[in-house]
């Protein structure tokens, strides 16, 4: 399918209780479009991890999702503090989250490694003090 | 195991999903960290947790988890119950601690769910 459905969302950074609403909407859309449950699950988990990161580390941002029958491309962009050491951030268990975030059940240092696990392509473009752009691709074909 | 059996074994109070209480789960996972639920669960499990906030339901939604047991007598507020109802999930609460609740379910035949060790 050459046709691409383009979705754009703004994620608010000031309300943790709303984190995940965008991932929920995209999950619903993919289900309605008839994507395989495994594909929908991969997108939902990778995107939710990214959305949580955006809210807890970067005061929100934007999410663009391009959906075609071949692949789902998710671009998450924020104007947060950036990631000083990406290699370290990719290690399971490494986290810079505050105690406040941990009390909410997150910040265990599993986010980025988990996004990598559930995506077929993951690219991080980050600049300290300027922000982070995370591009995730999940293939939809078997 | 049927969710109705889970309710009976844990003497739990059901807050949402009474209509699908006869549906079954194959395994369970217990954690207060949603980060770990997202990273370690690889099946449609029953989730036991002592964390009570909206992100528990959101996490369950992303993982296709359809039933949550809050342990240590933690009770969900209205916003959690309403979100769970809208996602067609079963929510219950037991006075048992995580260890005791898990032990009771495990010894009654509900397997654990974990990554390869």
Image (cartoon, coloured by chain):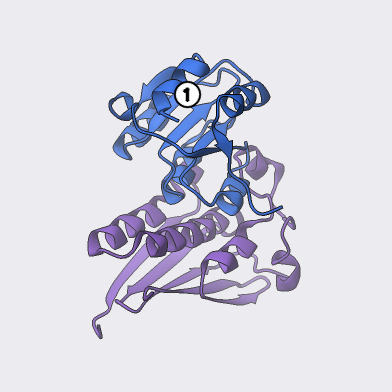
Chain colours: A purple, B blue
Q: Point out the image quarter for the C terminus of chain A.
A: bottom left
Is residue B101 depicted above or below B11 in this figure? Answer: below
Q: Is residue A132 left or right of residue A40?
A: right
Residue B97: x and y in percent read 64, 21
Query: To which chain does the residue with label 1 belong?
Result: B
Is residue A93 depicted above or below B84 in this figure? Answer: below
Residue B64: x and y in percent read 42, 47
Q: Point out the image quarter for the N terminus of chain A.
A: bottom left
Residue A104: x and y in percent read 60, 39
Is residue B108 depicted above or below A9 in this figure? Answer: above
Residue A15: x and y in percent read 48, 45
- Picture quarter containing residue A72? bottom left
Residue marked by disc 1: B6
- Picture quarter containing residue B17? top left
At 41% across and 61% down in the image, what residue appears?
A38
Q: Which one is in front, B66 or A110?
A: B66
Query: Dot 1 surroundings within 10 Å: few (below 14), some, or many (20 or more)?
Result: many
Q: Is residue A24 left or right of residue A128?
A: left
Mark 1 residue element: helix
């Amino acid at each position: 399918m050459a046709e691409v459905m383009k979705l754009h969302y703004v994620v608010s950074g000031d309300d943790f209780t709303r984190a995940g609403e965008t991932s929920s909407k995209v999950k619903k859309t993919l289900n309605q479009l008839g994507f395989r449950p495994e594909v929908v699950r991969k997108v939902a988990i990778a995107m939710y991890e990214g959305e949580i990161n955006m809210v807890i580390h970067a005061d929100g941002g934007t999410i663009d999702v391009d959906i075609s029958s071949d692949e789902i491309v998710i671009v998450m962009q924020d104007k947060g503090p950036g990631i000083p050491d990406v290699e370290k951030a990719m290690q399971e268990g490494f986290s810079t989250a505050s105690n406040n975030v941990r009390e909410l059940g997150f910040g265990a240092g599993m986010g980025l490694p988990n996004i990598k696990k559930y995506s077929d392509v993951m690219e991080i473009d980050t600049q300290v003090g300027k922000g982070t752009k995370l591009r995730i691709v999940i293939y939809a074909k078997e | 195991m049927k969710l109705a059996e889970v309710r009976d074994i844990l003497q739990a109070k059901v807050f949402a999903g009474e209509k699908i209480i006869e549906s079954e789960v194959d395994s369970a996972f217990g954690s207060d960290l949603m980060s770990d639920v997202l990273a370690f669960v690889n099946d449609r499990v029953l989730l036991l947790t002592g964390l009570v906030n909206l992100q528990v339901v959101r996490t369950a939604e992303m993982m296709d988890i359809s039933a949550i047991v809050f342990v240590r007598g933690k009770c969900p507020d209205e916003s959690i119950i309403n979100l769970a109802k809208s996602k067609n999930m079963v929510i219950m609460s037991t006075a048992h601690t995580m260890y005791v609740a898990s032990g009771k379910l495990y010894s009654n035949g509900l397997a654990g769910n974990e990554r390869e060790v």
